[in-house]
Image (tube, helix red, strand yellow):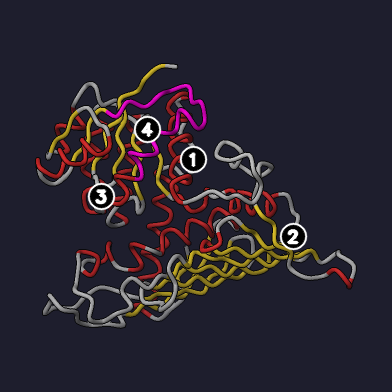
Amino acid sequence: MREIGIGIVGGGYMGKAHSVAMAAVASVFDTALRPRLEMICATSDASAEGYRAAYGFARATADWRVLAADPRVEAVVIASPQETHRAIAEAAFALGKPVFCEKPLGASLNDSRAMVAAADASGCVNMVGFNYIRTPASQFARALVQRGEIGAVTWFRGEHTEDFDADASRPASWRNFGAANGTMGDLAPHMINAALALIGPIARLSSDIATVHHSRPGTDGEVNDDIGQFMCRFASGAMGHLSFSRVATGRKMGYAYEITGTKGAIRFDQEDQNALWLYRADDTPDLRGFRKILTGPEHPDYLAFCQGPGHGTGYQDQIIIEARDFLQAITTGSSVWPTFLDGMEVNRIIEAARTSAASGIWIDL
């Protein structure tokens, strides 16, 4: 097992998650590459040094350019705000380094296109962080759909709803400014990615986007979007509805979906992430109804964390699974889903939704 030097840009919420994942992944999955926590970058020398000491990195910097250029940093993880993603990725690719970038890929569709072009030109491994689709339950749901267990999919309903901004008296933060930080830039990408993974490409959509709380303490200007939704038709012919909200009172991690097929149906809710609900139409009438399937060692990526069925995996485990996939891609030299191109497709759908909401018309993709 050889070492690989990891540099992480960002030490906060996701920076910590990726630091912990890189420290644990070789033990959990016995990966061919063992990550070495080489350097972490934050917005000041003091905060970077604090993260270095807390997470176990060898060095720290307040300049992402120093991190990207350092020869002992052999792969870069971007866990900083959306508007920084493009420049960091382009610099790393120019130096021939693999890049893992948190969602959304870019702060705009143009940024995402440039990042895909840089990845293609470099030939480097690239991956986007959509962690929720990697729960054992959602991986199993994807396998059930692909195996035809519920027949041809006719309908998909997905939501990503939370309530962290439901209180209008909550002071404004960076999340309340700029299109990339609103609900369509922040929450929508996860469920759009889930829809693409579970059902396939979206062919057309009609969208509506709104701001609920137009002002907050700490700002005199207009804040960004709080809620959004769109109807869609998938390329397969299935119909769908996706909704997103950061003002959904009572919802904490409302990443949930329902899939209806000609032979059955599936339900999932991230707030109960270790359970999948399955309905089979071919059951005898006295047995028809949704059955709760508790994830266990027989389900994708569960056994590496726990041998006991029903004991469950958690949020951090999703990030460790992503780290395993990224390291495997580096080992083989071949990018794995979701690549930067997959991340760009999510941005393309969000851009189409914004266009539809502004024009009031259906948009063909």
Image spot of residue 260 (x, y percent): 68, 67
Locate residue 16 relative to residue 306 in the image: left or right: left
* Image vertical order of residue 274 relative to residue 246, above or below: above
Closer to the camera in the image, 115 or 143: 143
Residue that carries the numbered disc 2 in the rendered image: 150
Q: Main secondary structure of the magenta part?
A: helix
Give residue 201's quadrant in the image: bottom right
Residue at image location 48% in from the left, 21% down from the top: 32
Residue closer to the observer: 196 or 59: 59
Tell me if label 1 and label 4 are in contact, CB under 8 Å.
no
Which amino acid type is shown beneath numbered disc 1? Ile
Quadrant location, the N terminus: top left
Distance (Cα) linking label 2 and label 3: 41 Å
Earlier residue among tags 4 and 3: 3
Labelled pair 1, 3 in contact (Cβ < 8 Å): no
Cα–Cα gap, marks 1 and 2: 27 Å
Reading the image, the residue beneath label 1 is 321
Amino acid on which the number 4 mark rests in the picture: Ala
Q: Mark 4 points at which residue?
A: 23
Residue type at mark 3: give it.
Gly
Disc 3 designates what residue? 12
- Amino acid type at circle 2 is Ile
